[in-house]
Image (cartoon, rainbow, N blue to C red):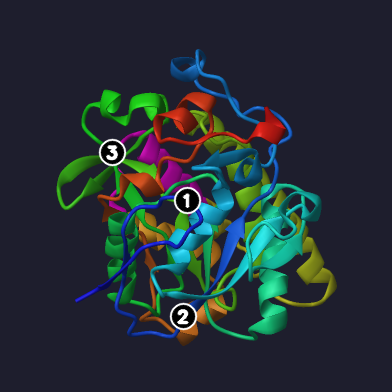
Amino acid sequence: MPRRHRHGRCGPAPLILTVANPHPPLPLVVLGGSDRAPARLPPSGRSSRPLTGCKGVDLEISGRPLIREIVDRLRATGRFAEVFIAGPAHAYRDVVPGAALVDTDADFGTNIRAAVEAVRARHEEGPIAFSTCDILPTASDLEKSLQDFDREPDADIWFPIVEAPEDSKALGASSWKPRYLLNDGGRTVAVLPGHLAVVDPDAVRLRFMYRLLRTAYQTRNRSIGTRRSALLRRMLADILFHDVLHLFRLRLPTLTWDTVIAGLRGTRRLRDQTLTREELQRTLRKLFVKRSHRRRFPERRVRIPILHALSLARDIDTLEEAESIGVTAAPSSS
């Protein structure tokens, strides 16, 4: 049975369930970069007030910086080893006791790159867990997510997505967030992206992933068509660059046109609401996992489970979303 824990004196916190740990604990990166400009919201969210700045410290819960509460909840599962905070040092220094600080404040992809390099300096191999500074995960959602991870811990990428309520109004202040439709076992499911992932950096095309994630973050909350066009331009630029570079080095290209075709087919089927979860997993493996790794480990997969874990999908983009879950602006940021 899971052991029950409560936080100490640093403010009230919900009951935390420690998940039984059959695998070595993972290094954990919490991304805490700053949003210099307000998030661009779709028409359904235009009445909300988007947030800027370092949400991990500009927001607080029960008088504590939000990022400290998030890290405490993740640590309480017993599943994570060293914690790395990737964000500007002037904002996060000494905020989370015992965490390593990765001083970075660039775009999303560059922040992830800095974090991976910092983790690899201390942990030479193995997967890395990632989360963000703007969610408030519940104990039960963390438990069910990590239990799912345990079903296949050798996956090259594990990225759970979250089944959305049928009625978007059930999301409250987050009802404006774009939902995506997937076919899962013959049923159409509306899903939201989660904010907890595990990636094996040795398996993936890191540079390609960094650049694509930067574009994906820049176009978050946009329509599928808009994101598809932006991601296609990014992929084409990368493939042209890498093809020329490899020709100069008398090497075969590692990013090929069939990779682009796979990405195009996947986004088109997602737009047409015909993409299955299995197809999504295969497409992402072809896009992000190195061909040499796929050949060496054909049994490994990219896993995209669909979970009922809504707190992992409700990232805080607006003041209304923050207030709806008991998060407030820190006095120094008001």
Q: Which residues are magenta?
A: 261-277
The residue at the point 25 percent across, 50 percent down is 308
Question: In terms of sequence position, does the residue under pointer 3 or pointer 2 come before the other?
Answer: 2
The residues tagged by marks 3 and 2 sit, at their Cα atoms, a distance apart of 29 Å
Q: Which quadrant of the figure has residue 231?
A: top right
Which secondary structure is most common in the magenta stretch? helix
Q: Dot 3 corresponds to which residue? A: 164
User: Comparing marks 3 and 1, which lies closer to the viewer?
Assistant: 1
| As drawn, 266 above or below 252 | above
Task: Indicate the secondary structure of the residue bearing disc 2.
Answer: loop
Q: Position of residue 35 (x, y in %)?
A: 69, 37
Q: Dot 1 corresponds to which residue? A: 11
Structural crowding at the residue carrying mark 2, measured as other residues with C-alpha within 10 Å and reported as few (<14), some (14–19) or many (≥20): some
- Amino acid marked by disc 1: Gly
The residue at the point 50 percent across, 42 percent down is 61
Whether tag 3 and tag 2 are in contact, CB under 8 A, the answer is no
| As drawn, 330 above or below 153 | above
Depth order, front residue of 321/160: 321
| Magenta residue check for 268 | yes
Question: In terms of sequence position, does the residue under pointer 2 or pointer 1 come before the other?
Answer: 1
The residue at the point 53 percent across, 62 percent down is 130
Whether residue 19 is visible? yes
| Magenta residue check for 324 | no
In the rendered structure, find residue 99 and report the number of the disc placed on it: none
User: Comparing marks 2 and 1, which lies closer to the viewer?
Assistant: 1
Whether residue 239 is visible? no
Q: Dot 2 corresponds to which residue? A: 25
Q: Is residue 245 left or right of residue 77?
A: right
The residue at the point 32 percent across, 30 percent down is 171
